[in-house]
Image: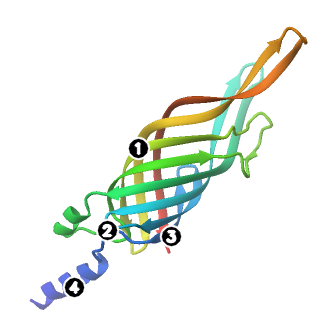
Amino acid sequence: MKKLLFTLLLSTSLFAQEKATDLFNANVSFIGIGIQYEKALSENFTALGTLDYMGGFRYSYSDFYGSDFEYILTTNIALEGRYYYNFDRRLSKGKNTKNNSGNYIALKGNYTPDWLTTSNSDNLGVNPQGSITLNYGFKRSFAQNFFYEFYTGLGLSLYQDDKVTFDYEIQNYKYYKKTETGVALDLGFRVGYNF
């Protein structure tokens, strides 16, 4: 009986049960690092601000030019409203909800300016772009303050595209930027630490 009571007390202290809480974290994603602040607005709603330094890369090869590896790193800012819809069900099953561990639906606004951009190629750059997506995700805590998170969603993207036309009157090229729209796929995985 004492062993059972000790086990129950230990498991309760390891997996403290709670509703949405305020969190500040540092994290690593597939290609980048970031910080986030999540503010609880009610028991199930939170607002999340994210600042990431992320990047991309490409590899190309041709018989004439040979191989080439290029990378680019830049800043990304996101604001997100989250609704954690399964806190009550997780609590009723005795599962962990510490540090906002649960499934959520979110509306996310994302902006990628051309700030602090670094690249190993003069041919790579960032045109300012943004998106609004409706996401589904889940977040789980482990080892006290560590967490992992997966999310995916679809939405609308807005981006500036460089355009070139030839003006026959002045016999010269005209360069301009045009705002385009498209479909945005938001897909990500993060591992981080809550402070």
Work out whether residue 149 or residue 166 is closer to the camera in this orientation and state it: 166
Callout 2, which amino acid?
Glu
Report, in whole angstroms, how far the alpha carbon at label 3 lies from the one at label 2: 18 Å
Q: Is residue 37 above or below residue 171?
A: below
Residue corresponding to mark 2: 43
x%, y% of residue 183?
49, 31
x%, y% of residue 80?
47, 54
Q: Is residue 60 above or below residue 10?
A: above
Report, in whole angstroms, how far the alpha carbon at label 1 lies from the one at label 2: 21 Å
Lateral position of residue 155 relative to residue 171, left or right:
left
Residue corresponding to mark 4: 9
x%, y% of residue 148?
42, 60
The residue furthest left is 1
Q: Are marks 3 and 1 in contact (CB under 8 Å)?
A: no
The residue furthest top is 168
**Mark closest to the chain's N terminus, 1 or 4:** 4
**Disc ID at residue 24:** 3
Q: Is residue 138 above or below residue 6?
A: above
Lateral position of residue 170 relative to residue 112, left or right:
right
**Mark closest to the chain's N terminus, 3 or 4:** 4
Q: Is residue 179 above or below residue 128?
A: above
